[in-house]
Amino acid sequence: MPVSAGMTSKEQEIHTIRSIFTKQSQSALQLFFLIALSIVLMVMDRHVDKFRFIREALSFPLAPLQYAVSWSAKQVSYLKKTVSSHDDLVQENVELKAERLLLRAKLQRFIAIETENNYLKTLSQSSRQIQGKTLIAELLNVDSEPFVNQVVLDKGMRNNVYIGQPVFDAYGVMGQVIQAGPISSRIMLINDPRSGVAVQSVRNGVRAIAMGDGYSNNLKLIYITKTADIKVGDLFLTSGLGDRYPEGYPVGKVLSVSKDPAHQFASIYLQPSAHLDSSRQVLLVWYQKHVSTP
Amino acid sequence: MSARPNFVAILITVVFALILTLLPMPTWTVWLRPSWVLLVLIYWAISAPHLMGIGTAWTIGLIVDLLSGTILGEHALAFTLLIYFVSRLSLRLRMYPLPQQGMSILIFILLYQFILYCIQGFLGELPTSNLYWLSSITSVLLWPWLFVMMRDFQRWFRIM
């Protein structure tokens, strides 16, 4: 009896030891496999265009979580607003009314100019529409890693959002849609290193490409020769040449110009006109350059 | 005891951590947000290593990637490596007194941030400020509270 008991305990011991070792080697193998899988995923995500469908499909079940967080954050801010004092609201109302009057006055002028412009464009057989369909969308109140230059919108393919669609806020170009789910979409801001906007100077019409700069959160004009006439404070608008953004929306103001003899090109930084980190409401624009006006 | 309630308990804590990750905060706290999900995963890997495998960590990392818009596989890779190390050391970590445990957590979180930093470096999208590393400090400062709360939660769910 004791002998057999000893045997079984020893067997058990061997069994546990064996199971520990096999488990560890298994888990090392699993680790290797998962790391390899992650690396494959990263490479595919960056280099395979069709991969974004998989990404969209996987993101869809997570949209409700984003909506829930956004909704609760909105409730909190609503609560804060309700307890803000009456005087503040009256003050704000007065200011808003004044601003509205000002904007209306400006708009009257613009309407006249726009009609004239459209008329002239039809005269010159231009195929470009000046105003397409627009839709106001709201950013979902969710944060992402601070080094990711993306935001999430509450409009998706249900509202005919498409990939590559330009997005604006009240002050200028925000970015473009890079992922359109059924009920939400993701926007790459113009200061992302992967983003590029074709721009044109207001002052003298110099054309350039504004790339995002990951290090300063600003934009950088690339391939500008040192002889180009660009000064600090120049405003750059979209030129409409990239086929992505419609023409004539503000992109940014020149922040600094440095012409270092050691470099082949001038390095010029733009401060984005859009309030990339504080705008809550944005404008989606349906823009197809080749849509002809009858 | 079946495995189902354990699974539900872990799911609840992870969802809670995901919500804390997404919750909008004032702008000045941008760099201070602790890595909630990783802290929760580390807790489970220390106290119940048989429930928190590296496969689970990888899946949760993928969810974080999808939610935060980082390249697919970035957080998955970091979580997998970290949880592998933590579960290998789980017996030792469980025995450590809280300050020593906190130091180990600091090293783990720094390693995690370093992995993310390297991947972002490969992509050419490095964090714009060195305040990036502050997040590990806030994570460690929150660790004791998180540890106590999670332990109560674990006892409440009777997970051994």
Image (tube, rainbow, N blue to C red):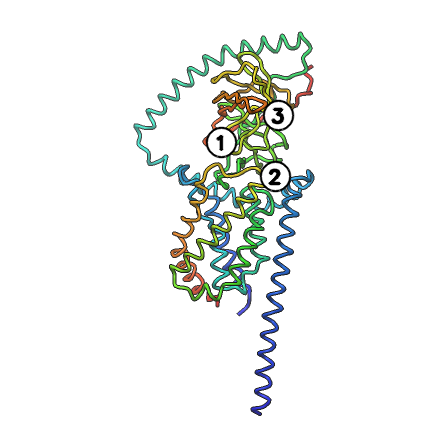
User: Distance of mark 1 from mark 2, alpha carbons?
Assistant: 30 Å
What chain does badge 3 belong to?
A: A
- The circle drawn on residue B152 is none
Density class for disc 2 (Cα within 10 Å; few <14, some 14-19, many ≥20) is many
Which residue extends farthest bottom? Answer: A1
What chain does badge 2 belong to?
A: A
Relative height, residue A81 to residue A112 (above, below): below
| Residue beneath the point at 62% across and 8% down | A119
What chain does badge 1 belong to?
A: A
Disc 1 designates what residue?
A: A216
Secondary structure found at label 3? loop
Viewer-side label of 1, 3: 1
Q: Nearer the viewer, residue A187 or A121?
A: A187
Q: Position of residue B32 (x, y in %)?
A: 42, 43
Residue A165 in view here: yes
Density class for disc 3 (Cα within 10 Å; few <14, some 14-19, many ≥20) is some
Name which of mark 3 and mark 2 comes first in the sequence: 2
| Residue beneath the point at 32% across and 28% down | A88
User: Distance of mark 1 from mark 3, alpha carbons?
Assistant: 30 Å
- The circle drawn on residue A181 is 2
Question: How many circles with numbers are drawn on the protein?
Answer: 3
State yes or no: discs 1 and 3 in contact (Cβ < 8 Å): no
